[in-house]
Image: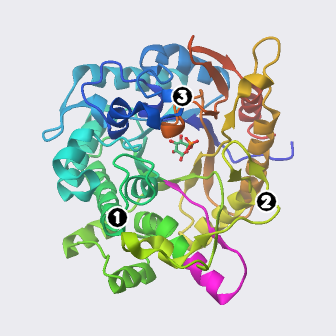
Amino acid sequence: MKYKFPKNFWWGAATSGPQSEGRFNKKHSSIFDYWYDIEPTAFYDQVGPNIASNFYNSYEEDLKMMKSIGLNSFRTSIQWTRLIKNFETAEVDEDGVNFYNNVINQCVELGMIPIINLHHFDLPIELYEKYGGWESKHVVELFAKFAKKCFQLYGDRVKYWTTFNEPIVIVQGQYLSQFHYPNLVNGKKAMQVAYNLNLASAKAIEEFRKGKYNKDGKIGIVLNLTPAYPRTQSKDDLEAADIANMIDNRIFLDTAVLGKYPEGLTQMLEKDGVIWEYTEDEIKLLQNNKVDFLGVNFYQPLRVKKRENKFDDSKGWLPDKYYESYEKPGRRINPDKNWEIYPEAMYDIAINIRDNYENIPWYVSENGMGVHGEEKFMDENGMVVDDYRIQFITEHLQFLHKGIEEGSNCFGYHLWTPIDCWSWKNAYRNRYGLISLDLPSQTKTIKKSGYWFKEAAENNGF
Ligand code: BG6
């Protein structure tokens, strides 16, 4: 075998509560549930989160199917809007408690390590309407209460927790680029939200460590990381990449792993009059509550150049003031997402973590390829023959392997996603799973990549 991975390597896949469960029996709505209710046309084919992949009802068969394709670990998230009845007191909803108990117990029984995430873009709409959601430090407190409740309920069996999935996407989606409700464009609020999300993560970590719920328990965060690649090595392009890197990656990465913000970032935000409100006690809290491990989502590289078109400041301060994105000529792309395919970044990420982030233990918490119209690749038995996905996974694993060989402390690889799931505004347009979903009948069928993955998992390499 050419590519052998470290002992106990995680071969798994990730989804989230709001994208797989469906809204069955949920007593509250998240911002996405609400947005779909008021504007279904904002979603591809007008398909919303109501049924999703029916995991709420079919989790038993689904988990068995995941086990059958060799997954030794599985990440999902607990929906705040399912578990909690009263957000202020964190009083629970019994049906929600039982559902997650059953999912976690079954994972453990099947021998699949559950990795439980606490927030995957699914802010309760009530908390947005009452308090402005993540703009509010009261919501930070409520999140810490919710997190504590999760640790109390499931911490005896769950050894790996993550506080947030891709917090920068919340900032971008809700406050900068208009793809999460309420679709605002407000750079100053965006920066406060980024700060509050870091604070919420640190408070949840503090709760976790106070409780000692499991002697092997570990807590981390999932970040979508990619080094910002400059167009050229010119001073201006390098500077643009440096700023993009601080705003898109390091704003969460440095804080989570090193316990502090990059100095260049806070100086720049202060100079621009958009620095967040903070207290000295909060800064100490961030310093004292660093993560134990990191989950890294990687889909596409970030390529930037110095700003060439004049920045339109009619909407006030925005990070785009400092850089523009750049399309590398001749790049390989996935045409269905228009995303560049650049597996080499896996190695760069591994080395960056090794050299600049204390070689903290980390795993690839998402990587994957979203493809539209996969039914056209089905064979006569209904199996999607997704050789493109096998190729995609193989290449990314090869570069990851090189990073591990050179000492990066990576302990696993999770594909997005085990079973095709609902993808926010894109709904079911692009499919990512190792298992396909026929939406009308909710039939689930293993794809060719699922069989490939099983073999790789069983051999711990390929
Ligand atoms: C990640 C998210 O950014 O990308 C997932 O964590 C998401 O929730 C996935 O579904 C795929 O992106 P998209 O835009 O195709 O849904």
* Amino acid under disc 2: Arg
Judged by depth in the image, the label closer to the viewer, 1 or 2, is: 1
* Amino acid under disc 1: Asn
Relative placement, left or right, of 309 versus 185 is right
Q: Is residue 345 above or below residue 418?
A: below
Residue at the far right in the pictured view:
1
Relative placement, left or right, of 372 versus 95 is right
Look at 13% across and 39% down and name the residue there.
Answer: 89
In percent of width and height, residue 25 lies at 30, 19
Q: Nearer the viewer, residue 305 or 447?
A: 305
Residue range highlighted in magenta: 223-242
- Residue beneath label 3, please? 45
Q: Which of the 4 image quadrants contains residue 140? A: bottom left
- Residue beneath label 2, please? 331
Label at residue 186: 1
Q: Secondary structure at mark 1?
A: loop
Look at 54% across and 19% down and name the residue there.
Answer: 62
Look at 64% across and 32% down and name the residue there.
Answer: 431
Q: Which of the 4 image quadrants contains residue 33? A: top left
Residue 443 lies in magenta, yes or no?
no
Which of marks 2 and 1 precedes in the sequence? 1
In percent of width and height, residue 274 lies at 32, 76
Q: Is residue 71 above or below residue 213?
A: above
Q: Quadrant of the N terminus?
A: top right
Q: Is residue 260 visible?
A: no
In percent of width and height, residue 170 lies at 40, 53
Q: Secondary structure at mark 2?
A: loop
Judged by depth in the image, the label closer to the viewer, 3 or 2, is: 3
Relative placement, left or right, of 416 versus 40 is right
